[in-house]
Amino acid sequence: MQCSPEHVRKTFRGKAVDIGTPEDRKKRTGQRRSLRIPVSVVEKYASAKAGVIVLYHAPEPKVSDEDSATRIAAAMLKQQREARAKMFRWVQGLEKK
């Protein structure tokens, strides 16, 4: 949705939570406001504008058990190789315990 920040403030007035603090307004570090707009409010607004029901689905991270197992196995192998290399360096007298 492309619109001005002022339009967003007017549209969601009373429905959004203003996260800004009074200290931010005193410092005058810019006219920035953070609004936390609930997903349900955005869905209702978009549905009214589009004329059809609009639902927001957050994408879930794609992490499978196989990926986790593969990463754990790779990390274990890496640790074993590093420990073995350290032992060989110690035997050769290049590294102290």
Image: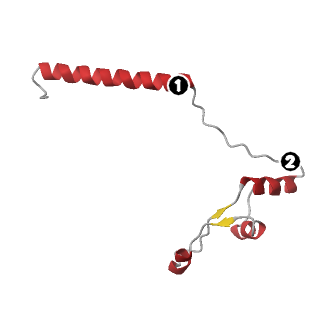
Residue 27: image location, x then y, percent = 50, 78
- Residue 74 horizontal side relative to residue 19, left or right: left
- Residue 46 horizontal side relative to residue 36, left or right: right
Vertical comparison of 25 with 79: above or below = below
Q: Quadrant of the rendered structure where residue 36 is?
A: bottom right
Q: Tell me the number on the disc at residue 58.
A: none
Q: Tag 2: residue type? A: Ile
Relative depth, front residue between 25 and 40: 40
Who comes first in sequence, dot 1 or dot 2?
Answer: 2
Look at the numbered disc 1 and give the secondary structure of its residue: helix
Vertical comparison of 48 with 63: above or below = below
Look at the numbered disc 2 and give the secondary structure of its residue: loop
Give the alpha-carbon distance from disc 1 to disc 2, as whole Å.
36 Å
- Residue 8 horizontal side relative to residue 84, left or right: right
Q: Quadrant of the rendered structure where residue 86 is?
A: top left
Residue 40: image location, x then y, percent = 76, 53
Q: Tell me the number on the disc at residue 67.
A: 1
Residue 83: image location, x then y, percent = 25, 23
- Residue 90 horizontal side relative to residue 26, left or right: left
| Crowd rating for badge 1 (residues with CA inside 10 Å; few <14, some 14–19, many 20+) | few
Q: Tag 1: residue type? A: Asp
Quadrant where the C terminus is found in the figure? top left
The residue shown at (39%, 26%) is 75
Q: Quadrant of the rendered structure where residue 61 is?
A: top right
The residue shown at (9%, 23%) is 93
Judging by the rendered image, the residue that carries numbered circle 2 is 53
